[in-house]
Image (cartoon, grey):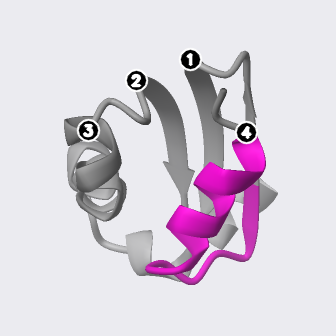
Amino acid sequence: MLAPEQIEVWIRSGLECSHLSIAGDGRHFEALIVSTVFAGLSRVQRQQRVNALLREHFETETLHALSMRCLTPEEFRG
């Protein structure tokens, strides 16, 4: 079973995050990803950026489902 910590490693390896939290049941996961990289990007572009990092894991079905909120630090602070 896939652990949330492994997904965190994959995301952090390609994206500088000021906050990253992942929860899930081993198959379906939810992520809150906060990064300055998201500034100026649409919600879809932000998710595409993260999906590109995880593409091989989705293709091999190591990672089945990940819903995500991708925010800038300013949005996260609210």
Q: Is residue 4 above or below residue 56?
A: above
Residue 53 point in image, percent of width and height: 33, 64
Q: Is residue 64 magenta?
A: no
Where, by quadrant of the figure, is residue 23 drawn?
top right
Please tell me whether mark 4 or mark 1 is closer to you in this view.
4
Q: Which residue is mark 1?
A: 28
Q: Amino acid at mark 4?
A: Ala
Q: Which residue is mark 3?
A: 60
What residue do we see at 72% from left, 59% from top?
20
Circle 3: residue type: Thr
Residue type at the position of mark 1: His
Reply yes or no: does residue 9 show up in magenta. Answer: yes
Q: Position of residue 57 (x, y in %)?
A: 34, 46
Circle 1 packing at 10 Å, graded few (<14), some (14-19), many (20+), is some
Of labels 3 and 1, earlier in sequence is 1
Task: Say left or right for 26 vs 53.
Answer: right
Tag 4 residue: 3
Q: Can residue 31 be seen?
A: yes
Give me the residue at 73% from left, 76% from top.
18
Element type at mark 3:
loop
Q: Which residues are magenta?
A: 4-20
